[in-house]
Image: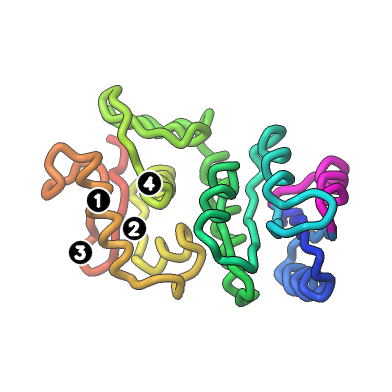
Amino acid sequence: MANILVVDDERMLVKGLKRSLEQEGYAVFTAYDGPEALDVFHRESIDLVVLDVMLPGLGGLEVCSRIRRERETPIIMLTAKGEDVDRIVGLELGADDYVVKPFNTRELIARIRAVLRRVRVSDQTADGIIEIQGLTIDSPKRKVFVHGVEVDLTAKEFDMLQLMAAHPGRVYTRENLLEAVWGSAYYSDLRTVDVHIRRLREKLEGNSKKPEWVLTKWGVGYYFKEKV
């Protein structure tokens, strides 16, 4: 099971989250300010960091930036502000997800599972690169090419494509995709999946109405074409 570092100056929040994560089988390390977070991160083998934006000593955004310069360890940031500017800055620095306080602990744990699942999918592919009939998915660089031409995908579009392409032929229900990509089956409307699939096809397929790669299993969900 994964090693998780929880960083927040609210000690009761850290204590409660630590207990909940340990009940899920995770090993949990804690820190209450920026310098301590970096010290624990360098000392232990951390698989994911839950990181508050507002920290004493060294802010969460700076901690995120320093971690990202060293490793690709996934980071979920916490904020009490809920301001778009903080979310944008955090994601540009390399954060994998964002959760606004106050949050539901079950929702955060679902997000943690989703991020770790995406990391495992990337690690399972040779060099993190998937190639099939003119489509190339470069997981480490989060880039997609169709016949050598780069296609601009949103983060969620990329995550959906990467997940399905890593398991060709496996059918994912809308609920499966919401949980894996958004972090919870209750995070958004099921129609969100259909909209993202449609946009993904429009960007990838020569004819989005007769898709070559992202296919539909009628009455069930979506899947990526199996290699021939």
Residue 140 within the magenta-colored segment of the rendering: no
Mark 3 → mark 1, Cα distance in angstroms: 18 Å
Residue tagged 2: 171
Q: Quadrant of the N terminus?
A: bottom right
Mark with earlier residue (3, 1): 1
Mark 2 → mark 1, Cα distance in angstroms: 19 Å
Q: Identity of the amino acid at label 4?
A: Thr
Residue nearest the viewer, comparing 56 with 198: 56
Q: Identity of the amino acid at label 3?
A: Trp
For image coordinates 37% across by 53% down, the residue present is: 170
Mark with earlier residue (4, 2): 4
For image coordinates 15% across by 46% down, the residue present is: 208
- Could you tell me residue 122's position as x and y percent? 53, 41
Q: Nearer the viewer, mark 2 or mark 1?
A: 1
Q: Examine the rendering and report whether any part of residue 109 can be seen.
A: no
Mark with earlier residue (2, 3): 2
For image coordinates 30% across by 22% down, the residue present is: 148
Name the outermost residue toward the top.
Answer: 148
Residue tagged 3: 218
Q: Is residue 189 left or right of residue 121?
A: left
Residue 34 within the magenta-colored segment of the rendering: yes
Mark 4 → mark 2, Cα distance in angstroms: 22 Å
Q: Nearer the viewer, mark 4 or mark 2?
A: 4
Mark 4 → mark 1, Cα distance in angstroms: 10 Å
Disc 1 crowd rating (10 Å Cα; few below 14, some 14-19, many 20+) is: some
Mark with earlier residue (4, 3): 4
Disc 2 crowd rating (10 Å Cα; few below 14, some 14-19, many 20+) is: some
Residue tagged 1: 199
Residue tagged 4: 154
Q: Is residue 18 left or right of residue 177?
A: right
Residue extent of the magenta highlight: 33-48
